[in-house]
Amino acid sequence: MFNYLLLAGIVIGLGFLIGKGTHFLKITSIVGYIFAGILLGPDFLGVVKDLPPMEAEVLTSFALGFVAFIIGGELTFSLLRRMGRGIIAIILGESLGAFVLVFVGIYLLTGRLPEALIFAAMAPASAPTGTVAVLHEYRARGRLTNALLAVVGFDDGFAILIYAFSIAVVGLLLGSSGMSSLSALVVNPIVEIGGAVFIGSIIGILFAVVLKNLVEREEIIAVALVAILLTAGISLFLGFSLILSCMVMGMIVINIFPQANRPVFEHIRSISLPIYILFFVVAGLNLHIKLLAAIGLLGVVYIVCRSVGLIGGSYFAALMSKADPVIRNNLGLGILSQAGVAIGLALLASHKLSSWGMPEMGSMVITTIAATTIVFEIIGPLAARFAIIRAGEAKRI
């Protein structure tokens, strides 16, 4: 039996030490945590040769739910009203910008429409954990920080919708999907997102009342973790968006009793560091450096087009909606991270392509997205750090 207790101690300890080192070098600690995972993984020291998928999924799901709850706690109705329609325009702009540029880039490279659509569908998905961890590390506060939290919280829901429509069109292009299948592919993500909102709202209302009446820090943390685990677990069981459900739950908790429940999120943030370390070290364990050799020109085009699409799309949407210049000039840099959601969508696409008799294309999608994830998981936190420092919102450098 593998000694997971010993591994957890090594992971958190080594991740913390390397993270402190990278922070000292003016590089965000998140890069240090990822490097610690790569160091412990099979490509270097081999301390962990093959982390079982079930254990990795449990930890990843909990961390995503934890981060989504924190994001929800920042999204008060008063803040969203102040942001107005501009934040919706930015979410649409960055998501569609990444989709369109990746579609055009991949199509010009390969000349294959289905392939271009599938990679374009992967592009809008972001990784909220990387952005939120950087904001926490540098104690960022301000207009850009608020906008980043809103964007990384909501854009995954929109990314799921984009993927659903895209994969449906791919099925039609390949002659492997009838209108009934098209209808199912459109309806399913709407049900997934609607179900996530419903679950998050119901559990949020219940626990908002419970948390309001607690005073002791330890009790608040314990009950908040129960709420996160229940919401994440039910969402996974029913096939709903875990990130969206936990974010909605956090929004309900803070907005029903804003003053009484604000300490809930302060206490939860106080225990976030070891969770962030575990999450990113495990991410590093799964980032096999040998995949970088498999990126090729296809991966390079995907990386460049996605980055330009996110940055350019958010910039022009912010410009058109007359958003604050601080948001307009920096937000795109803060949303480059990509990990779990994109890989999950790539797996779904691969299974679908295999069922349509295109296993080679499915393998190519998974390999390319897994390889480019390594790049985005490193440059994403660095770009987010640069953005909040340039915006003057980093309280600790």
Image: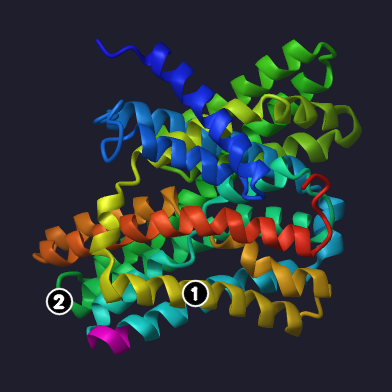
From the viewer's perspective, tell me whether residue 286 is left or right of residue 50. Answer: right
Q: Position of residue 347 (x, y in %)?
A: 28, 52
Residue 89: image location, x then y, percent = 68, 74
Residue 149, magenta (yes or no): no
Question: Relative to 53, does residue 83 appear above or below in the rendering?
Answer: below
Residue 98's label in the rendered image is 1
**Residue nearest the viewer, comparing 134 with 105:** 134
Colour scheme in the image? rainbow
Identify the residue at image location x=83%, y=50%.
141
Question: Helix or strand or loop: what does disc 2 sit on?
Answer: loop
Q: Which residues are magenta?
A: 107-111
Q: Amino acid at mark 1?
A: Ala
Front position among marks 2 and 1: 1
Q: Residue at x 78, y 43 (%)?
A: 139
**Pointer 2: residues within 10 angstroms few (<14), some, or many (20+)?**
few
Q: Quadrant of the N terminus?
A: top left
The three-letter code of the residue at mark 2 reads: Gly
What's the mark number on residue 175?
2
